Image: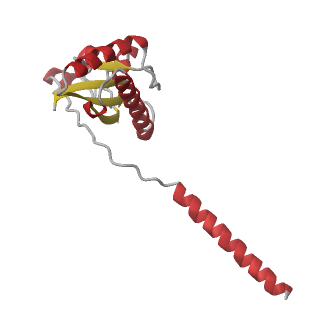
Amino acid sequence: MTKVRMTLYFRAAILGLSLSIAFLSGCGTTSQPERPVQQVLKPPVPAEAKADSPPGITSGLSEKKAEPEIDEKTSVFFVFGSSTVGQSEKSKLRDAASRLKEDGDLSVTLIGRANDHGSRSVNLAVADARVEAVAAILRKLGVKAWQIKKNVIGGEKLPGNCVSTECRRTMRRVELVFFEG
């Protein structure tokens, strides 16, 4: 009788251990929803830059030219790894909120971005938190929720010659894109 109990106990322990392992392995893999990916077209490299430098290096271009065109008035910038909107950036959001409240047909898309530090999932999370912070401030300022659309891009690939603090700062932003509808 003792041998039967030991066998049942052993089987129950193996079953419990197997179920625990199966449960924990399921927690280790999570699928994330697909997010829209924005393709960034690279500007053509001048012929003299191609001939004089190794692949991937554009010696004839300055860092300023490497930056995409960024409208300072419609972009909210963030400190590295943060989703807190600074006081100077809040004035931009007050202006945007006034514009949206004056024109009931106007809407805004908030495009969240991060620089290339961190993994893709971390960059998406940071960019998403930034978009949510901007949206919350706009709603608090009286903008209707239906006027606010959200788009999270996450990490941006920085141009090879974007090495300054200022250049990297411009990649950590939420863009406000206004449209009718």
Residue 106 versus residue 87: which sits nearer the camera?
Answer: 106
Residue under the image location 47 percent in, 24 percent down? 82
Q: Count up the numbered dots.
A: 0
Residue 102 versus residue 59: which sits nearer the camera?
Answer: 102
Quarter that holds the C terminus: top left
Image spot of residue 29 (x, y percent): 48, 55
Residue 49 versus residue 127: which sits nearer the camera?
Answer: 127
Residue under the image location 35 percent in, 26 percent down? 139
Q: Looking at the image, is 145 positioned above or below residue 92?
A: below
Residue under the image location 40 percent in, 15 percent down? 165
Q: Looking at the image, is 8 positioned above or below residue 151?
A: below
Image spot of residue 23 (x, y percent): 57, 62
Colouring chosen for the image of the structure: secondary structure
Q: Residue furthest right?
A: 2
Q: Residue furthest bottom?
A: 1
84 left or right of 16 in image: left
On the question of residue 55 being in view, the answer is: no
Residue under the image location 83 percent in, 86 percent down? 3
Give the quadrant of residue 8. Answer: bottom right
Give the quadrant of residue 83. Answer: top left
Give the quadrant of residue 46. Answer: top left
Quarter that holds the N terminus: bottom right
118 left or right of 172 in image: right
134 left or right of 72 in image: right
On the question of residue 178 being in view, the answer is: yes
Q: Looking at the image, is 12 positioned above or below residue 22?
A: below
Image spot of residue 124 (x, y percent): 40, 37
Q: Looking at the image, is 149 positioned above or below residue 65?
A: below
